[in-house]
């Protein structure tokens, strides 16, 4: 068992001041080299693709280190990488070892399709368990931190950016496509970098720190580890995200929801309300009353609705002990700059943590029609089981987004056995529905 970091550091290490000016000369490679030197990093076993795992120490106190480098396919996380990280997170959660993540990654490996999505789901679920176990977790970011990698970074309570880091749920090509322009357009690139770059992220949240030079990394790292060792997780960060939204988080009273597919899904009865896609209420299944939350209607999920859903989930965690059903019909997270200004990754990670707080009572995610992207990860990773209504579809990303990344679209719709084999869903619900 590894020892915990001392929880009583000098006051100067608890709240390191953000740098006033941010030079552009510190490369992620230099930051990684400094990290290895500062932690006396020793690799443990052979690397798997972009992932190298190891041990280290800071001030003679042991810790675990996971490195995700941009060696293959922009540092993306495929089946092999996710399998290694899943085991690693489980060990760390048992040990309660302080953990440092280095992430220079474009997220899940789109080219591997559903197997990569299923592997990422399992890995992110293990990371959620680690984050909620009280493990002090700090993320150090390289050039790119996109998609699921950016959600992973936001499970850490402190993030240390390279001056050149760009972090977002969607990469520049997808953001440009959503804006109706080209990622090569200089004016768009300037706007995008001003939104998702390190300097902007540091201004958005105090928990985002920029490392001005490699000499500063040691103090930033020590301060971050000491800080998270005494900090509470969960609803504390949820409240901070509310402040970022202002009054936009307020949800109006929903209207009564009645649908033929829900009539068939809940034949013993249900009472649900829906407001702009956000669903809340209860239903009776197999003689048991269950709470119901969800996001339906086919619209993309942005920061505001993610926060509203998380707030409802945190309320259930305090007030109810019943099993929970999560309804999902949403093929992707929002892919525009407006949500990225709010740091959408932070809100999806918060949503995942809120759902994870409900897992022990029994948490089932039901995909009614479509699911994909970071929304699928947020709904599926904490769940005990994912059920897919017959005719529904789960995808890594929408076809247009995949085409912008790979230069090709995926035309073939998978069969349920493909989902089952990939670990994306556990059960198919054949409700005998006709299209609405």
Image (cartoon, helix red, strand yellow):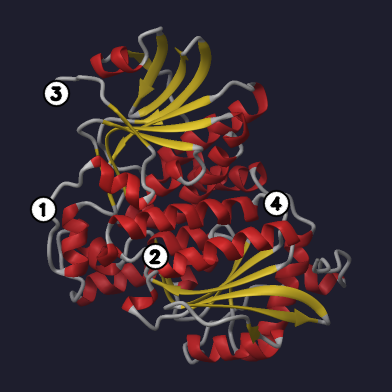
**Residue pointed to by mark 2:** 79
**Residue pointed to by mark 1:** 411
Tell me which label, 3 or 2, sits earlier in the chain: 2
Q: Which mark is residue 81?
A: none
Is residue 333 something that shows in the picture?
no
Residue sitting at x 28%, y 64% = 112
Residue 313: x and y, percent? 55, 32
Residue sitting at x 23%, y 30% = 390
Tell me which label, 4 or 1, sits earlier in the chain: 4
Quarter of the image with the N terminus in it: bottom right
Q: Which mark is residue 133?
A: 4
Q: Nearer the viewer, mark 3 or mark 2?
A: 2
Q: Which element carries disc 1, helix, strand or loop?
A: loop
**Residue pointed to by mark 3:** 435
Residue 386: x and y, percent? 41, 37
Residue sitting at x 47%, y 46% = 381
Residue 161: x and y, percent? 53, 75
**Is the residue 424 above or below the residue 305 in the image?**
below
Tell me which label, 1 or 2, sits earlier in the chain: 2
């Amino acid at each position: 068992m590894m020892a915990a970091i001392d929880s009583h550091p000098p006051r100067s290490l608890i709240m390191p001041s953000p740098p006033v000016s941010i030079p552009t000369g510190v490369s992620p490679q230099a930051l990684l080299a400094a990290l290895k030197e500062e932690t006396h990093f020793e690799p443990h076993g052979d690397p798997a693709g972009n992932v190298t795992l190891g041990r280290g120490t800071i001030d003679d106190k042991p810790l675990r280190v996971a490195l995700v480098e941009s060696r293959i396919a922009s540092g993306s996380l495929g089946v092999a990488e996710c399998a290694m990280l899943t085991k690693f997170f489980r060990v760390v959660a048992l040990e309660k070892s302080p953990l440092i993540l280095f992430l220079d990654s474009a997220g899940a490996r789109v080219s591997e399709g559903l197997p990569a999505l299923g592997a990422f789901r399992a890995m992110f679920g293990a990371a959620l368990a680690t984050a909620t176990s009280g493990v002090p977790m700090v993320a150090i970011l390289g050039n790119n931190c996109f998609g699921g990698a950016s959600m992973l970074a936001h499970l850490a309570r402190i993030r240390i950016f390279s001056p050149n880091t760009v972090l977002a749920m969607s990469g520049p090509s997808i953001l440009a496509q959503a804006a109706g322009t080209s990622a090569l357009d200089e004016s768009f690139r300037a706007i995008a970098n001003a939104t998702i770059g390190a300097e902007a992220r540091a201004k958005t949240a105090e928990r985002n720190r920029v490392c001005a030079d490699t000499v500063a990394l040691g103090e930033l790292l020590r301060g971050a580890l000491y800080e998270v060792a005494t900090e509470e997780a969960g609803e504390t960060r949820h409240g901070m995200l509310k402040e970022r939204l202002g009054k936009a988080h307020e949800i109006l009273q929903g209207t009564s929801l009645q649908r033929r597919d829900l009539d068939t899904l809940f034949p013993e009865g249900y009472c649900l309300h829906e407001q702009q896609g956000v669903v809340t209420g209860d239903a009776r299944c197999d003689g048991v009353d269950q709470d119901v939350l969800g996001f339906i209607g086919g619209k993309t999920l942005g920061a505001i609705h993610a926060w509203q859903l998380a707030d409802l989930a945190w309320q259930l965690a305090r007030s109810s002990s019943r099993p929970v059903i999560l309804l999902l019909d949403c093929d992707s997270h929002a892919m525009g700059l407006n949500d990225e200004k709010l740091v959408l990754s932070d809100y999806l990670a918060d949503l995942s943590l809120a759902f994870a707080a409900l897992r022990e009572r029994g948490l089932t995610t039901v995909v009614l029609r479509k699911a994909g992207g970071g929304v699928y990860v947020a709904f599926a990773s904490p769940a005990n089981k994912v059920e897919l209504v017959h005719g529904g579809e789960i995808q890594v990303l929408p076809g247009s987004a995949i085409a912008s990344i790979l230069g090709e679209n995926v035309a073939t719709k998978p069969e349920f056995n493909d989902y089952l084999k990939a670990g994306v869903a556990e059960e198919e619900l054949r409700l005998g529905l006709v299209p609405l």
